Amino acid sequence: MNTSHLKNLFLVLLGNTIYALGITMFILPGKMITGGTTGLALTFNHYFQVPISVFVFGFNFVMFILGAAVLGKHFALTTLVSTFYYPVILGVFQKIPALGQVTDDRMLSTICGGIMIGFSIGLVIRAGASTGGMDIPPLVLNKKLGLSVSAMLYVFDCSILILQMTFSNAEQTIYGIVLVMIYSVILDKFLIMGTSQTEVKIISTQYDAINHMIQKQLDRGTTFLQAETGYLNINQPIVLTVISNRELVKLNKLVMDLDPKAFIIISHVNEVKGRGFSSQKIYK
């Protein structure tokens, strides 16, 4: 097993550990309702007194078999660790009384639990794996029926919340909805964290000087986009570059020093792949 695989394995274990901690410290003591496999486990625990860790293990195992049969062996391997490690570590944490006595404030539990769940799932996904459980049915439906994965995730989460409403009061329901919203936002933000960049297009008669300046002073690559001005119909290259968000102010000042009449178009991009970003720069 190479270093990359060991790193990913560590992230999957860490993500599932944080997930189990969030459930043990904030969700279960606060009698919160939530989506996913944990939400189903809470429902079965209430009606049938099935221990949460036992239900999670059994449900994850069934979903693992379903995923392996429909989605293939590669998928099964990426979810293997989460499928069996999470219920085990959850059962271990539930046996530590101190973890369930962190706070009695439901709002604090909602916020902290949402942050930990969103962050932990993000770690697992960024490691190229899946948390298993309720992640699998939407993927199966997508492959078999072409249904949207994100839409199906929301449908299943909402259905699980509705199931729990049958034994929850209005306050618990509201906190549950807020919890799902918090961890969904945290997950989205975490997945693009560190990868978002700024795309800048510069239209100027001083394009050669601007191109040279970006390469030498910002150490960023550039591309000329061939264009024609709309009013005078002059062929004039547009300088395209992608920089970090922090470099935007410096770039703007340098461009304005070279050409105060330059036209600058700034766009936010979620992720950039290639030399200088996802791979090492090569200088010639």
Image (cartoon, rainbow, N blue to C red):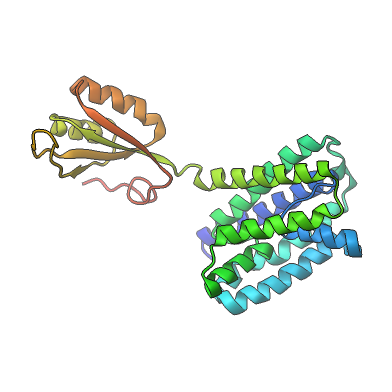
Q: Residue at x 40, y 33 (%)?
A: 245
**Residue 48 locus on image (x, y percent):** 90, 65
Considering depth in this image, is 1 or 273 the residue closer to the camera? 273
Specify the quadrant that holds the N terminus: bottom right
Q: Quadrant of residue 105?
A: top right
Query: Residue 203: x percent and y percent?
Result: 20, 33
Please say whether residue 5 is visible from this viewpoint: yes
* Above or below, comparing residue 31 to residue 40 in the picture: above
Q: Position of residue 213 (x, y in %)?
A: 21, 30
- Give 93 or 58, whichever is nearer the viewer: 58
Q: Is residue 6 visible?
A: no
Q: How many marks?
A: 0
Determine the residue positioned at 76% across, 55% down: 162
- Left of 26 or right of it: where is 145? left
Q: Residue at x 33, y 25 (%)?
A: 250
Residue 45 rendering spot, x and y as whole percentages: 87, 60
Can you say whether 122 is above or below 129 in the image?
Answer: above
Q: Residue furthest bottom?
A: 69
Vertical side of 65 occupied by 194: above or below: above
Q: Which quadrant of the figure has residue 47?
A: bottom right
| Front residue (pair 17, 54) | 54
Q: Is residue 160 left or right of residue 67?
A: right
Left or right: residue 178 versus residue 224 is: right
Which residue is painted at 62% across and 47% down in the image? 184
